[in-house]
Amino acid sequence: MASGRLAIAATATFLGILGTVACSASSGESALAGDAPPTAAAGSAPAHAPGRIGAPGIGDPDFPTDGNGGYDVDRYRLKIDYDPATKHLSGVTGIEARATQDLAKFNLDLRGFEVSRITVDGSPAGFERFKDELVVAPAKTISDKARFTVEVTYAGEPDPVRGSSNLGTYGFIPTEDGAFVACEPNGAKTWFPSNDHPADKARYDFEITVPEGLTALANGELVGRPRSARGKTTFVWRESHPMVSYLATATLGKFELRQGRTATGIPNLAAVDPRYRAALDDLYTQSAKATDYWTTVFGPYPFSSTGGVIDDFSAGYALENQTKPMYGGFTPDGSIIAHELAHQWFGNSLSIKRWRDLWLNEGFATYAEWLWAEHNGESTVEKTFRSHYAAGPDAAIWKYAPGRAKPEDLFNSSVYNRGGMTLHALRQRIGDPVFFKLLKTWNAEHKYGYVTTEEFVALAEKLSGKQLDKLFESWLFTDRKPTEW
């Protein structure tokens, strides 16, 4: 799914448990003060003066328009007011960032909405729209390395991404009683202006206002008690650890909650739509058990709380939203819960810079499922590995090299299963003591940072003292069945 969601339609393949945009220019494109910048004509990019313009993409060749260049975001401050009855969202997004070059203009990713006002460092800024790009022109050039703030005021009906080949619908998805918000790979732009690519992590503050009687859930921990006034309730959440944009959520609606701590003391919050109230206790218990167990395998839990959310939107997938994995319209079993919580290490704390390295998220979380099954006295990892390896040489899994995830088929089962098999082949080659030391060292050395396949190979060779290039080449980068490793 994007980075971490596990498609239920593909669960049979991934887990073996069920069998195996363009938006037109808004009316708010003009500057609030001074002359309005020219509106970009449909199909043509805005004119930019060279040298001081932030790039319209962050530099991922497979997703060239995702994210933006010229700055790094440190924190988002999101104020959202959403009415499920009208599907109307009013938002004010504050962005604290640092320039990485001189900036006369820079881009934000935003899909739809009417933008009424933008300020930079408190002064009105000009802006224009080009498809899903919001081009901002500050009143004066921002100097390289300078810290600056942006505030964007916008409103409208969220428009989630639909028709994805792997995921169907994702982003901010209106539901009957609220919204289901799961954004991988690039759906953050469907509800707030952002640098929407995993290569720019930031901290998040959420202030979410909903009709009284509903609950708003976001990443991190609740700050104070919800405040109610004039028929509305405001929830304030804060995620103080760095987070990629696709993991941000503002899922809201009617929920039943259970709160407490895991056996090792980690705060734990489970929330379910009333339709799934029978699953509340199991979600709470399994999330706690999986989180605590992974600390013994992968190292200390990287965040301040854990848990999970079951909503009634039939998404057909789960997503590892940071601190609160999201399960869309189904009751997850322990294997899926273990997968999504393993992502808190692999994908959330350790994040990829480019989508081509997605196996570092999904292959690791899939291997975690196999470890979880063995831990619970079910199938051994070796047996699971052999069952997948038994596929004939013409099987689809061998035609997709998972070390280079394809943008048009990002969440192919090979990225999950063959990615997991790569780790088991490595474990067989270097032995258990080195392999499990590798997992903990990998997490410790890159906590809250970014990782690449090349870095993982280098660390595996360093700790094992073995040359492993042929193993990784055959498992990750070759479109045929590996025969030796």
Image (cartoon, rainbow, N blue to C red):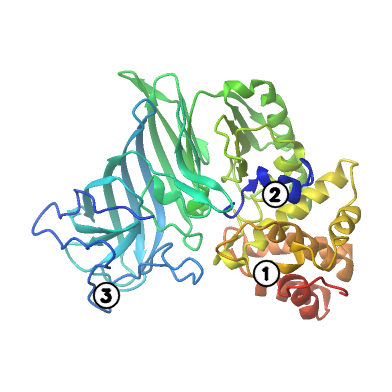
Whole-percent x, y for residue 268 in the image: 64, 34
What amino acid does circle 2 point to?
Ala
Whole-percent x, y for residue 193 in the image: 35, 51
Location of mark 1 (residue): 403
Q: In which quarter of the image is the C terminus?
A: bottom right
Left or right: 147, with 2 as reference point: left
The residue nearer to you, when weighing 476 against 325, is: 476
Q: Is mark 2 on a helix, strand or loop?
A: helix
Q: Is mark 3 on a helix, strand or loop?
A: loop
What amino acid does circle 3 point to?
Arg
What amino acid does circle 1 point to?
Gly
Q: How many labels does the image show?
A: 3
Among numbered discs 1 and 2, the one appearing first in the sequence = 2
Location of mark 2 (residue): 342
Residue 436: quarter of image: bottom right
Number of the front mark, 1 or 2: 1
Question: Which residue: 74% across, 34% down?
Answer: 286
Residue 483 lies, with reference to residue 218, above or below; the image says below
